[in-house]
Amino acid sequence: MTTAYAPAPPRDAPGDARLLRAFATTRDQRMREQLVVRYLPLARYAASQYVRHSEPFDDLLQVASVGLLKAIDRFDPANGATFSSFALPTMLGELRRHFRDRGWTVRPPRTLQEHALRVERVADDLLRQFGHSPTVDELAEATGLSHERVLEAREAAAAHGVTSLSVRVGDGDDAAELGDLIGIEDDGFARADDRVTVAALLRTLTQRERDILWLRMEEDLTQSEIGRRVGLSQMHVSRLLREILEKLHTAAVREGRGTERVFGKRAGVGTAGAWPATNV
């Protein structure tokens, strides 16, 4: 049975430097295999830093071993650094990429993934240290993240796995599939997502452009009414609205969004223009 935890990273032995220099010169594969065997405890230590209940330790050790091979092949003895100090970050980076690229059922942004991994790792360490699940305050202090970031990271950690809608819930005659127990479709999440998108798109506008868009979208004023409010002609307002919607459309395309979904049909940008020509 593989030992999952290593108390501390092993150090370089006196003869390692000679073997590393010899391999760097000859690229002898037998020397490479000797180095792998010698530094496998270091790979085991690296894997132990990312142990999860849902991830078999042997799989993590395999990922760390890939990082070890890369470190052996790339290490330059002439740079003056010890091999352990070079190899450990390489293996940890390989493990982070493994979780970032393959370990997520739903993939959040990279920064949030890294925060989630850090919080999970620290939470496991604090659980072993304190004997109880750490609080948000304790996690924030240990990770250097804000309380909000810790909470976001813990929510994102749920994306590591999913529960099948076919799983049975309940016992006996009362058992039912999870999918049958889910309520009606709620568009609240979509609306919340749209609000976030709108906020991001509006940051591409100037304050005057945001004011004009507000008068049109929220107060439902006509172009003439907007012109009187801001001291511009109806034609000038019409041109500004088209420019505003074109700018929003360009930003929305970059975000993979359509302006019709976010702002409604009347905000659609097409060849005929952004706004109804008769709404003056």
Image (cartoon, rainbow, N blue to C red):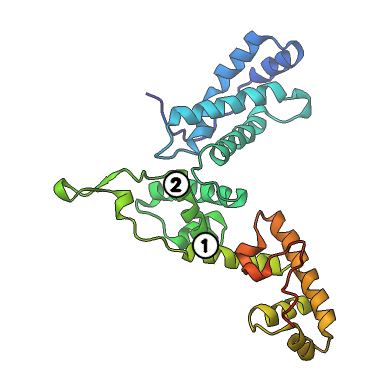
Task: Please state which of the two labelled residues, at mark 1 or mark 2, is closer to the viewer.
Answer: 1
| Vertical side of 89 occupied by 219: above or below | below
| Vertical side of 93 occupied by 195: above or below | below
| Percent position of residue 276, x then y | 72, 74
Q: Earlier in the sequence, mark 1 or mark 2?
A: 2
Residue 170, which numbered label? none
Q: Check the picture and name the quadrant holding the N terminus.
A: top left
Q: Residues within 10 Å of mark 1 (few under 14, many from 20)?
A: few
Q: Quadrant of residue 79?
A: top right
Residues under numbered marks 1 and 2 in contact, where contact means CB atoms less than 8 Å apart: no
| Percent position of residue 57, x then y | 44, 31
Of residue 248 and residue 224, the one placed in the foreground of this image is 224
| Percent position of residue 216, x then y | 69, 80
Q: Residues within 10 Å of mark 2 (few under 14, many from 20)?
A: some
- Could you tell me how far apart the alpha carbons at marks 1 and 2 are, in whole angstroms? 37 Å
Task: Provide the residue designation for mark 1.
Answer: 190
| Vertical side of 11 occupied by 96: above or below | below
Looking at the image, which residue is at 78% across and 70% down?
242
Residue 148 seen in the current view: yes
| Vertical side of 164 occupied by 184: above or below | below
Task: Provide the residue designation for mark 2.
Answer: 125
Looking at the image, which residue is at 79% across and 86% down?
227
Q: Is 116 on the left-hand or right-hand side of 69?
A: left
Q: Amino acid at mark 2?
A: Asp
Q: Is 10 on the left-hand or right-hand side of 225?
A: left
Of residue 20 and residue 221, the one placed in the foreground of this image is 221
Q: Quadrant of residue 134?
A: bottom left
Q: Residue furthest left?
A: 173
Of residue 150 and residue 35, the one placed in the foreground of this image is 150
| Percent position of residue 12, x then y | 61, 25
